[in-house]
Amino acid sequence: MALLLFRVFIVSLFLIAGYFYPPFMLSRTAGGLVGLFFGLVVVILETRVRRAQFRIIWTASVGTLIGVLVGWLLGSIYHTVARTPEMSSFIRIFFLITFPYIGFLLGVKKPEWLEPGFFASFFRSKSPEQSPKLLDTSAIIDGRIAEVCSTGFVEGHLVVPQFVLKELQLVADSPDALKRQRGRRGLEVLDRLQKISKIKVIISDLDFPEVRDVDSKLIEAARTLRAKIITNDFNLNKVAKLQGIEVLNINELANALKPVVLPGETMRVFILKEGKEKDQGVAYLDDGTMVVVDNARRMIGQTVDITVTSVLQTTVGKMIFGRYNGDVH
C-alpha cells in the first residue's frame, strides 16, 4: 500500500510540474498531460527494474554509459568529414543513438562481458587456474565429499553460499528427527572440510534476493563466479547442464569407481533376501550394487559363489545378474 501511494505521489509531481512548467511551449493542460505521461513511464520502468536482477541492471547501465562515451567520441571524430552542418549533426546523433543501444543490449544479453573479471582476464597469466566449486545442500549432507577431498582428488576452493548454509541450518532445526539428524550431519561435514589442509572452504555472502528457490540461486552463483556445482541432486544436475553450468555429481563419481564386472566372472556374495522371480536371491556388494542370483532362494543367509551372467547399467547405478554355482561358505 505504501509503495502504491508513493507511485501516485511521483506521478502527481510529474503532473504538477508539467502543468506549471509546460515543456515544448505547450499550454498548461497539454503540459500536464505530458507530465502525466512521463510519470507513468517512470513508474512502469520502476516496476521492470524491481523484477530484474541487480547484476543485469548494473551491466546494462555500464554498457549504456560506455556506448554514450564511444558514440560521443566517434561522433566528434567523424563529424569533421561532413560538408554541411546538417550532415554533421546527423552523424553525431547517429553515433549517440547506435552505440548506447548496442551497449545496453550487451549489458542485458551478455552481462559477463562487462564484469570487472572479464577485463581483468586480459591481464592475467595464461597458466591454467582452478575454478571454484559450489557445494549444494545435498552434497554436504551426503558427506562423501569430505572423503573425496581428503584423498586430494578435489583441489582449490569450495564455496558455500550463505543461502545454502541457511537451508542447512533450517534442516538441522527441523522438528522431524530424521531431517534434524541429516542437517546436523551436514554441519559436521562442513566442519571436517574446513579442517582439510588440501582445500579452502569459503562462506560466500553472494545472494540473489529476487530468486526464490535455492537451486536457481546456485545456478546464478555458478554463472557469476564461473564455478562448478558439486551436487547429488538429479534435477539440479539436469537444469544446470541445460544452462551450460558444469556439474560434478558425486553419485556419478561413485558409479564410475565401482569395479568392472564381466559376464563369466566368479564372485562371492551374501544372499540377503529372496528375489521377485522364482528361486531368485538378492545380494548387495559393499558399494551398494544389487546382485540378483538365480537358483539361490534356498541359500538366504549364506555366502555363496556365483557366476556373473550379465550386467545392467541403469540411471541409478549397476545391477548384476548371476547364477548360483552350488558352493556354500
Image (cartoon, rainbow, N blue to C red):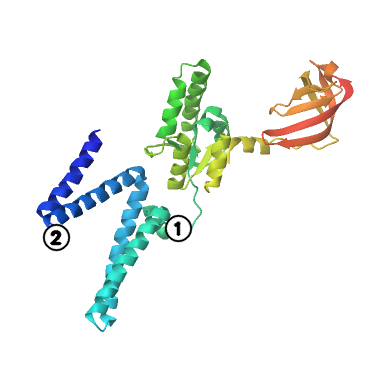
Q: Is residue 69 left or right of residue 28?
A: right
Q: Toward the viewer: 194 or 182? A: 182
Q: Secondary structure at mark 2?
A: loop
| 224 to 183, vertically: above or below | below
Residue drawn where x is 80% and y is 16% of the image: 300
Amino acid type, callout 1: Ser
Q: Position of residue 180 (x, y in %)?
A: 49, 19
Q: For the view shown, which residue lies furthest in the bottom direction?
A: 83
Q: How many marks?
A: 2
Label 1, secondary structure: give it. loop
| Residue 241, quarter of the rendered image | top right
Give coordinates of residue 214: x percent, y percent.
45, 35
Q: Disc 1 marks which residue?
A: 125
Q: Amino acid at mark 2?
A: Leu
Check disc 1: other Cα within 10 Å, few if <14, some if 14-19, many if 20+: few
Circle 2 residues within 10 Å: few <14, some 14–19, many ≥20: some
Q: Is residue 153 visible?
A: no
Query: What residue does disc 2 label?
Result: 26
Nearer-the-camera pick, 42 or 60 = 42
Q: Earlier in the sequence, mark 1 or mark 2?
A: 2
Separation (CA) of disc 1 from disc 2:
61 Å
Residue 7 in percent (x, y) is at: 23, 41
Relative height, residue 9 to residue 76 (above, below): above
> Residue at point 16% right, 49% down?
15
The answer to whether mark 1 and mark 2 are in CB contact below 8 A is: no
At x 48% / y 58%, what residue is drawn?
Answer: 126
Give the quadrant of the C terminus. top right
**In the drawing, does residue 206 fall left or right of residue 323?**
left
Q: Residue at x 12, y 52 (%)?
A: 19
User: Please, is residue 211 above or below residue 89 in the view?
Assistant: above
Question: In terms of image quadrants, where is residue 270?
Answer: top right
Q: Residue furthest right?
A: 326
